[in-house]
């Protein structure tokens, strides 16, 4: 078992990617606003992430291609290929721009709680910092320190959840009696969008090829990659559950709505006391900076694969992709008048775009010429199809609600 745990790698990257400010904020808002009533959405999102990331990792291990390359070779007809690539690149670009808005706003909220000044002011500095880190190549130097802070914050949330003793009966009811309380739809979609992150599918398919090179037997690599993905994502889900639970215990019973990072920090007071605000703000800043740099970079890799570009980090086209995403994310973060609401909306936008990428992944995973005996079987297609249908249904319902066609 120790040897298996040493093989954890790409899955931890995926888990670390979705434990960002968007997850912290969205889970806190969900717990404060609706208690445990939409806990089913979190459970669904964790299971969905495991299902889709397993497919992405299997694609990378078996085909030695990224998801973007696989999609390019799936459609023989030039028109269909162009439309497919256009749709995927659009989803990745818009989805990551929305995600980046949440990352930058989250880091800015952390700075506001630590230093003062409105988050809109700090958003400019966070965006500029992320741009400078990627442009200079210095990001990897401080990445480990930032990730370490996020890990410590995650552990503190789990310990706090143990201390506050959330109601097991209410939690089980929230999981096994699914429902969408009035006004909760955007939060439900946001919980899914902040956990099942589309760009992680591209990131995973590429990173497993480095972790398990062709010299490793395919079946061994698949077994180890499945354990890696399942365990890592489950741990990430546990952290998100802890955040939601502490917020439910701290705010829901008192009917308090979360509007600032300072308020979110109160859920850690049972463990940290007066230091909770500063600890939470530092963790939120670290999570925001980490995600603000990695998300645009992953989007650039995904776009390069889909368009058939050579993966050259110094290429002007590659830099243009992540540069545009950072700039757009920064602009929306600066324009946001309600930072917490902006973060939740950004995660919801990502959830609406999720079915596009999930649908294309399912198409690629059924290619006999690409995956042979390792292509999707009936069980994998049923599970993946269920995730696709639920995500599509919730996304459409949210869009129709925004247009006033149905009640949200």
Image (cartoon, rainbow, N blue to C red):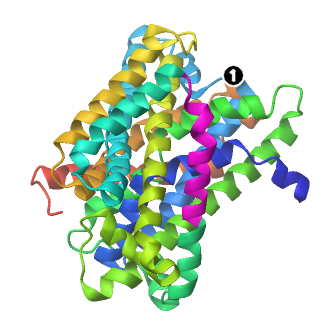
Image location of residue 19, percent across then percent down: 51, 54
Report crowding for label 1: few under 14, some 14 to 19, many 20 or more residues within 10 A (C-alpha): few
Q: Main secondary structure of the magenta part?
A: helix
Nearer to us in this view, 212 or 333 = 333
- Residue 224 x/y as whole percent: 81, 46
Q: Residue at x 63, y 61 (%)?
A: 234
* Residue 266 locus on image (x, y percent): 38, 76
Depth check: give the residue in front, 198 or 13: 13
Q: Residue furthest front?
A: 115
Q: Which residues are magenta?
A: 137-154
Look at the image and tell me whether residue 29 can be seen.
no
Give the left or right position of residue 83, taking residue 272 as reference.
left
Q: Nearer the viewer, residue 27 or 196?
A: 27
Quarter location, residue 191: bottom left
Which residue position holds label 1? 369
Determine whether 303 is above or below 40 in the image: above
Residue projecting furthest to the left? 404
In the image, what residue occupies the spot 18% across and 46% down? 336
Indicate left or right for 267 with 59 as reference: left
Classify 11 as above or below 131: below
Based on the picture, tell me whether residue 346 belongs to the magenta stretch. Answer: no
Q: Can residue 258 be seen in this snapshot?
A: yes
Q: Residue 113, how many percent across, how many down?
A: 33, 60
Quarter holding residue 70:
top right
Which quadrant is the N terminus positioned in?
A: bottom right
The quarter of the rendered structure image containing the C terminus is bottom left
Query: Is residue 327 placed above or below 289 in the rendered structure?
Result: above
Please indicate whether residue 19 sits to the left or right of residue 230 in the image: left
Residue at (68% x, 31% y) in the render: 60
* Residue under the image location 44 percent in, 16 percent down: 319
């Amino acid at each position: 078992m120790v040897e298996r745990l040493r093989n954890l790698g790409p899955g931890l990257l995926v888990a670390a990617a979705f434990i960002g400010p968007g997850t912290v904020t969205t889970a806190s808002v969900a717990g404060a606003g609706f208690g445990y009533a939409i806990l089913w959405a979190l459970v669904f999102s964790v299971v969905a992430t495991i299902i889709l990331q397993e497919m992405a990792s299997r694609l990378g291990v078996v085909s030695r291609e990224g998801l973007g390359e696989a999609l390019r070779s799936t459609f023989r007809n030039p028109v269909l290929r162009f439309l497919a690539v256009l749709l995927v690149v659009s989803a990745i670009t818009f989805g990551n721009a929305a995600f980046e808005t949440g990352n930058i706003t989250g880091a800015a909220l952390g700075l506001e709680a630590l230093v003062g000044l409105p988050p809109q002011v700090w958003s400019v500095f966070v965006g500029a910092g992320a741009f400078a880190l990627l442009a200079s190549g210095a990001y990897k130097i401080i990445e480990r320190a930032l990730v370490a802070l996020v890990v410590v914050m995650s552990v503190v949330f789990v310990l706090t959840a143990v201390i506050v003793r959330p109601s097991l009966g209410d939690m089980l009811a929230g999981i096994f009696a699914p429902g969408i309380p009035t006004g909760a739809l955007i939060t439900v979609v946001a919980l899914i969008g902040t956990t099942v992150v589309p760009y992680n599918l591209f990131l995973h398919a590429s990173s497993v090829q480095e972790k398990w090179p062709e010299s490793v037997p395919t079946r061994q690599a698949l077994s180890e990659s499945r354990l890696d993905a399942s365990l890592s994502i489950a741990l990430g889900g546990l952290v998100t559950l802890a955040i939601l639970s502490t917020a439910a215990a701290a705010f829901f019973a008192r009917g308090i709505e979360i509007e600032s990072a300072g308020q979110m920090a109160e859920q850690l007071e049972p463990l940290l006391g007066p230091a909770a605000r500063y600890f939470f703000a530092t963790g939120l800043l670290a999570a925001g900076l980490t995600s603000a740099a990695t998300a645009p970079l992953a989007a650039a890799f995904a776009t390069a694969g889909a368009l058939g570009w050579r993966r050259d980090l110094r290429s002007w086209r590659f830099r243009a992709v992540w540069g545009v995403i950072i700039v757009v994310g920064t602009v929306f973060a600066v324009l946001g008048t309600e930072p917490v609401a902006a973060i939740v909306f950004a995660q919801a936008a990502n959830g609406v775009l999720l079915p596009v990428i999930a649908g294309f992944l399912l198409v690629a995973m059924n290619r006999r010429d690409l995956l042979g005996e390792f292509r999707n079987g009936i069980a994998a297609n049923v599970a993946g199809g269920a995730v696709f249908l639920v995500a599509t249904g919730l996304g459409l319902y949210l869009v129709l609600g925004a247009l006033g066609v149905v009640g949200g």
